[in-house]
Amino acid sequence: MLRQILSIARNTLVESLRQPLFFILIMICGMLQAFNTASASYSMGYSTTAEVSGDDKLLLDIGMATVFVIGTLLAAFQATSVVSREIKDKTVLTVIAKPVERPTVIVGKYLGVLGAIMLAVVVMITFLLFGLRHEVLSTAADEYDQPALVFGLGAVSISIVFAAFGNFFYGWSFPQISTVGLGLLVPTGYAATLLFSKEWELQPISTDFKPQVFVACVSLAAAIMVLTSVATAVSTRLGQVMTVVACAGVFVLGLLSNHLLGRIAFENDFVAVIRTAEPDAFRFTEFDSRSARYSVELVTFPEVSLEPGQAVWYGPDPTGFTMAVPEYEPQTEADPGRPTIAIAEADGTSLVLTQAGESPVRVQRPPAPGDYIFLQPTSRNAAAMAAWAVVPNMHYFWLLDAVTQNREIPPGHLLLVCLYSVAQSAVFVCLAVVLFQRRDVG
């Protein structure tokens, strides 16, 4: 089975790379990234210490959106060209009649399409990185980044010229050879660009390399991997146009899933946001002992009146999705000894939280700046949670805000994003297998 999957994947990869539209969309992305360096000016962005600042923030935003949209289109077009079209033309019968199991066909097709899409994504992301290295031409006095232009245009030109030569003299597929050439030469050209400053002075390769931007781009590639699996599943039943529409629908729904589903999956309303938090004594640092006290300063006045004795919960998410405090039944007049985190003192934007009761609440951590304060535990909607989990959440893959706000993206978060992508892709590939099992291909 593994040999069959790899054979189908290899043939699908070659077939995908030979599609003229595949090469055309990659080149359109490259031209748009070049155009962005001029069109992203005048955004009046402020300079910061982040990896991108000023007008380059808008350049990164537009550039990543360009890769995202074109990657989605590539996934839809390539999935239909190797699945839906073969079913329509009945050429898939030549594979199934070998005999080859239907799940093997779908998995092989998906891996082949995914390989082609990831090659295209590498090229498109490198075009984006070239644009960020060149930076936005905000004024007429700004000079072109000559190393970026020389190595970038050189890599594209060599790939196209070599593909044209091979096509004319040996009959090679022009889209295939040019795309493979771009996949090899464009990243190599970018690495060579990093070795030189704009004045052609040698420098360490890490000088202009932006690791957080690279992490955000890897996360973006993981999102396109999910959309490729969606396109593969849809193309087993629908044609090219409807597959594109379905992929666009999943893309938009994934961007809106937090608003449509997430906000009703976990229901809670915060009353205040913590600006600062300090223990009243060193022994209360962990806030896990009886009578421990923490003094907190709020960002603004609370939305409701807070009184001493009220039970509170706190956590980092404004919806109450994650809490640093477990659910518990607060104290009542009938049972005043229950473990409770309560307000000991309240004076405007100043609060003192304490561990009330005969034993402490087992908190994950003490209050911290940026935490939200709630007056009740979070209620959960099981149906909304299930739907929220099934729909690919594109917000998990969009790490642009963290880059522009100079928030470091920990490696563990990227690992979770990649695992989420693999899990979502596996679900949709399994759905594709189920849909194809009963599909009449004769």
Image (cartoon, rainbow, N blue to C red):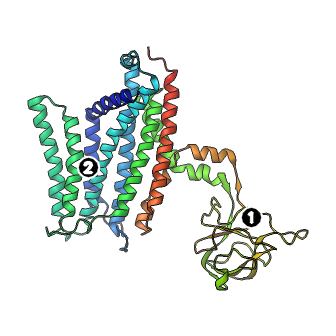
**Kind of residue at disc 1:** Gln
Residue that sits furthest to the bottom in the current view = 281
- The percent coordinates of residue 375 (x first, y second) are 74, 67
- The percent coordinates of residue 345 (x first, y second) are 75, 82
**How far is mark 2 from mark 1, CA to CA?**
51 Å
How packed is label 1: few (under 14 Cα within 10 Å), some, or many (20 or more)?
Answer: some
Residue located 47% across and 32% down the image? 233
Could you tell me which quadrant the N terminus lies in? top left
**Kind of residue at disc 2:** Gly
Q: Is residue 43 left or right of residue 145?
A: right
- The percent coordinates of residue 359 (x first, y second) are 78, 72
Residue located 23% across and 41% down the image? 179
Q: Can the viewer see residue 248?
A: yes
Question: What residue sits right under mark 2 in the picture?
Answer: 30
Under tag 2, what secondary structure? Answer: helix
Q: Is residue 262 left or right of residue 339?
A: left
